[in-house]
Image: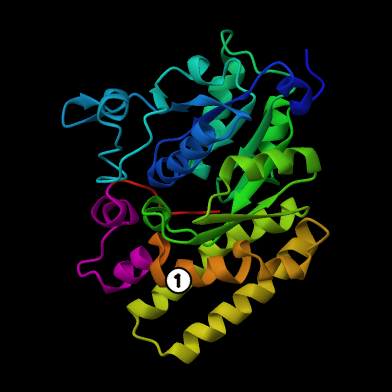
Amino acid sequence: MYRNLFDKLKDGPLKISILGSGNWASAISKVVGTNAKNNYLFENEVRMWIRDEFVNGERMVDIINNKHENTKYLKGVPLPHNIVAHSDLASVINDADLLIFIVPCQYLESVLALIKESESIKIASHAKAISLTKGFIVKKNQMKLCSNYISDFLNIPCSALSGANIAMDVAMENFSEATIGGNDKDSLVIWQRVFDLPYFKINCVNETIEVEICGALKNIITLACGFCDGLNLPTNSKSAIIRNGINEMILFGKVFFQKFNENILLESCGFADIITSFLAGRNAKCSAEFIKSTPKKTWEELENEILKGQKLQVC
């Protein structure tokens, strides 16, 4: 039994596990795998949980472990050899000190339920989690941040990472930034070491609420920007939507979470993420095509055609 992560470090390096296998999870696995390999604080092997799916008749687990590439969601990008994929949750979570959640918001609840219901999964009492999932969880007329939902479900502290990040840009090692929000300063020190690289700079703040609100609500703003593009509306109209959207984002935080530190908008998770998302994000692309398509295509059809089966980012 360890009191905290620093207590655990006295007995050896920390074990990192990733839950998720989409393009963002795969890009982040490259970041985390690189840092795990080069930092004495962490075990070299990083375990990665993926659903047991097949690509051209071959198990995704085997593709990642043998070819070191996610050929479905991040084709052409080599992953570090210390990333080891598993389809069994217990193999990934048991004995892990650091849990990184990168599953779409709409699937987070079901993944947590699998963890909670499994008799073979044991989460260490000193373990810490971080959410890279953007969105809110709504249950019984109550809205929760993803980090709070994870924390309440697993009874461990959970921070949040969000920022102006296109997965392929990060995977190709183009310079990017991200923001980590958390209330535990000791955890923030560790999480910064997990993610920070010369091409992926991390800034830590104490405002988890604002970091997650920005990450979730920018999805609505970028959908509206895509509608503008689909309707061929001028830049002035799009600018008005963005300005009003940011004002509503601030008001949303104050009404539903009783606070919103507007300085956080100057971090990567704020204005920068909104700009990146409407310039190159999946929501803007799909919403523009939704307006233009004739005959009208469903969102599911657009996800399959444009996103290759990935899901839109929703709240």
Which residue is label 1 attached to?
278
Q: Main secondary structure of the magenta part?
A: helix
Q: Is residue 293 magenta?
A: yes
Name the outermost residue toward the top: 119
What residue lies at 26% left-to-right and 53% top-to-bottom?
301
Q: Is residue 36 magenta?
A: no
Instruction: Classify 249 as above or below 158.
Output: below
Tell me where the magenta segment starts and ends, as one range.
285-308
Q: Is residue 146 visible?
A: no
In the image, is 304 to the left or to the right of 257?
left
**SS for callout 1:** helix
Q: Nearer the viewer, residue 69 or 108?
A: 69
Pinpoint residue 107: horizontal percent, then vertical percent: 49, 37
Instruction: Classify 124 as above or below 107.
Output: above
Tag 1: amino acid: Phe
In the image, is 222 to the left or to the right of 285?
right
What residue lies at 47% left-to-right and 68% top-to-bottom?
276
